[in-house]
Amino acid sequence: MSPNPVPTTATTTIRGVSVLSDPRRPRADVFDLSLSSAGIEIRWEGRPTTHMSWDRVSQWEIAERRDGVLLTLRGSGTVTPLVVPGWTADDLDMVMRAIAAVPAAAPATPLPSSQRPTSRFRTEGRTRRTLHRPAWPWKPVWSWKIVATVVLLGLLATAVTLVLLQSAGVISWSILGPTA
């Protein structure tokens, strides 16, 4: 992106945005975000535009990554992590704050200060923080509970099979020696 921030008087369009996905999966579809005082428009190629008002966004987080910026939108119990390529955290934070500060054309009842959107721009002693992993913990494909369950079911199936084969007379335990 250019070193000068994008003016936010009307609308700022960010191209090439995608939803953060597991790195082992193919990259998600790319779309454009159009930010204005009325809300966020999501523009997918070949699909109708989706509009989301700022009332649905209670908080956002911005974190710098190697491939751009991670913009995490939170609201109504949902978390949406978006990868914004080619931007810096400072520029995106400035644009988000400027757009959130501009009142909508037809303002509704103002939100109480406890429900207004806030920014959690991660600095932690530095001007930028580079994240090498997603902002929230990913569930691994094979969690330990799944592996333990499969192993225990395998042991149970083996034991049942051995008992059935022994009771049918297919298996002789004489290799173990005298048994009483």
Image (cartoon, grey):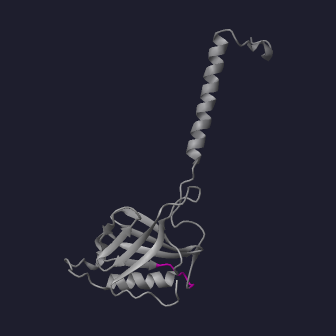
User: Residue 166's image quarter?
Assistant: top right
Compare residues 77 and 96 and report the one nearer the observer: 96
At a point 56% along the width and 82% down the height, the residue shown is 128
At a point 57% along the width and 50% down the height, the residue shown is 141
User: Residue 53's image quarter?
Assistant: bottom left
Q: Residue 97 vs residue 68: left or right? A: left
Q: Position of residue 43 (x, y in %)?
A: 38, 68
Q: Position of residue 87 (x, y in %)?
A: 51, 79
Q: Position of residue 63 (x, y in %)?
A: 51, 75
Outermost residue toward the front?
46
Quarter of the image with the C terminus in it? top right
Magenta stretch contains residue 58: no
Q: Which residues are magenta?
A: 121-126
Q: Is residue 105 above or below residue 146?
A: below
Does the magenta stretch mainly form a helix, a strand or a loop? Answer: loop
Q: Residue 20 vs residue 95: left or right? A: right
Q: Residue 91 vs residue 106: left or right? A: right
